[in-house]
DNA sequence: CACCATTTGTTCGTATGTATA
DNA sequence: GTATACATACGAACAAATGGT
């Protein structure tokens, strides 16, 4: 394909429009790898730099994402993770027609310490159950959630989760009929190697990190959590509904 | 300093406790560079691996952040950027005793297109004013905000911002007595080279990206924005107040 | 642009102590 | 006691990112 070099539109802009059309029309499917920059340069009969200039624009438009050494990929549809007073993982996924999943990666009893102790108002010396859960949607990993439940109140919740595989269901068993989100604080950082492997994402893509506290109906803290989302598949939504 | 190798505490854990104490006591100030891994290894008379192991733990505790090729730094206090129905930059900073600042980086008139057009409900062919603003707190850059105001309603708002340097004040002049946040969607991605330079951050540290829509009291969309926060200095807070 | 020193990141291999069956 | 498994600790080399010349 040879692009007209006479019209009032620069070559790189024509390439942008061309690829934009192909992506939006579905000729390149979401998640699919685009041809390499050299292949595109050959196809449009231009220099590779001209293609690169177009790719920068496509990235700004969130239509593609480029990974050094791997290639350019059509941006996947992002799962919207809604955060509000009543945030429940399963409900959240169901609302968007995603099949929720959860695997217990790790469980442990830890000393009260640092942020976790402060959030749960745990005095020094008291302990908490830590559970690391891999969150999945449609069979694909989307987040690693570390939850801390204060002891002795929630003794055995880890064993129970293996059975029920739902935190909400477990809490109900412990007499927590309802709970609400007190706060959520969101940051971003690169993943550790382990996190990248578990979430099946390149180390160059950041994590969205949400730290949150849930309390029961009496206002007692019951669950401090730190959830690390794959930022290629998830966006956090705050709708004022 | 030689660490006891006989006690019931492993070497790397002793190093964690040692550095933790020095950071919390202020012996290493926030933002300061720690000694290199080799220097710490010499100081504690251990192998570099043993120091690295301790650093992993300190990172998990959010006490330090490590940058390849540069070193390890004591984690700075994070500015909390609160997001809610009534989100105003200046108020937000003032509440936390930060001195707010804003510089107009760039202004432009753009065709309605993509997400922006959809959010502002702008038909094809209509235009909008785009303003890129560098947000600062205490003189340090914390975010780049791109705002889109629909035309013709807000003709000249860019000129006005140069005078007033406050979006809220400009909107008041245009008869917008009050406005509210309809939604905020948060993602994360690596910065472009330009963004990294402007925000004075390494390219290895991610941006927090918040896309948001504001409407006036009649529910008409007036401002679509895409704000890119330096994730080393800012965390987004959602308090249920 | 290339080149270099500094610093962190990764991967081999090796040795040792400490539980546990 | 012995065998096995696992975590701890050290050593050397190389890769990758950064910053300066």
Image (cartoon, coloured by chain):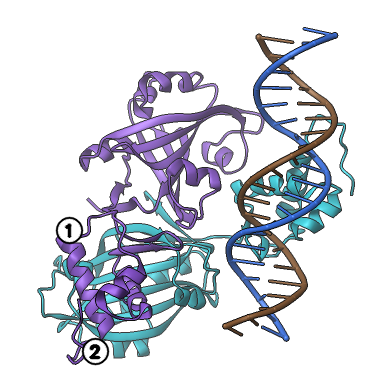
Chain colours: A purple, B cyan, C brown, D blue
Q: Name above or below for residue A16 compared with residue B56.
A: below
Q: Name above or below for residue A81 compared with residue B131.
A: above
Which residue bears the numbered disc 1?
A: A26
Q: Judging from the image, what secondary structure is the residue with disc 1 in? A: loop
Residue at image point 42% right, 35% down: A134
Gap in angstroms between the C-alphas marked 2 and 1: 39 Å
Instruction: Judge by depth and name the residue closer to the eye, B44 or B136.
Output: B44
Which residue bears the numbered disc 2?
A: B156
Chain assignment, label 2: B
Q: Name above or below for residue D9 compared with residue A41.
A: above
Q: Position of residue D7 (x, y in %)?
A: 69, 31
Query: Residue A178's quadrant in the figure?
Result: top left
Quarter of the rendering occupied by the N terminus of chain A:
bottom left
Q: Is residue A134 left or right of residue A93?
A: right
Q: Position of residue B102 (x, y in %)?
A: 43, 80
Q: Are marks 2 and 1 on the same chain?
A: no
Instruction: Judge by depth and name the residue closer to the eye, B71 or B144.
Output: B71
Chain assignment, label 1: A
Q: Judging from the image, what secondary structure is the residue with disc 2 in? A: loop
Badge 2: how crowded within 10 Å, few (<14), some, or many (20+)?
few
């Amino acid at each position: 394909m040879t692009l007209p070099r006479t019209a009032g539109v620069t070559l790189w802009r024509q390439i942008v429009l061309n690829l934009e059309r192909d992506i939006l029309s579905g000729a390149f499917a979401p998640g699919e790898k685009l041809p390499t920059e050299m292949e595109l340069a050959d196809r449009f009969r231009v220099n590779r730099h001209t293609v690169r200039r177009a790719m920068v624009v496509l990235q700004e438009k969130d239509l593609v994402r480029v990974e050094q050494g791997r290639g350019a990929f059509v941006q996947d549809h992002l799962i919207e993770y809604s955060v509000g007073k009543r945030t429940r993982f399963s409900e959240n996924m169901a609302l968007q027609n995603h099949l929720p999943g959860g695997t217990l990666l790790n469980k442990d009893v830890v000393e009260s310490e640092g942020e976790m102790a402060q959030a749960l108002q745990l005095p020094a010396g008291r302990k908490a159950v830590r559970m690391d859960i891999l969150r999945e949607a449609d069979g694909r990993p989307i987040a690693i959630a570390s939850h801390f439940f204060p002891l002795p109140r929630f003794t055995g919740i880890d064993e129970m989760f293996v059975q029920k595989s739902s935190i909400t269901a477990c809490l109900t068993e412990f007499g927590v009929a309802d709970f609400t989100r007190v706060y959520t604080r969101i940051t971003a950082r690169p993943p550790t190697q382990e996190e990248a492997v578990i979430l099946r994402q390149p180390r160059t893509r950041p994590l969205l990190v949400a730290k949150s506290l849930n309390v029961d109906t009496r206002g007692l803290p019951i669950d401090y959590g730190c959830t690390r989302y794959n930022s290629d598949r998830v966006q956090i939504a705050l709708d004022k509904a």
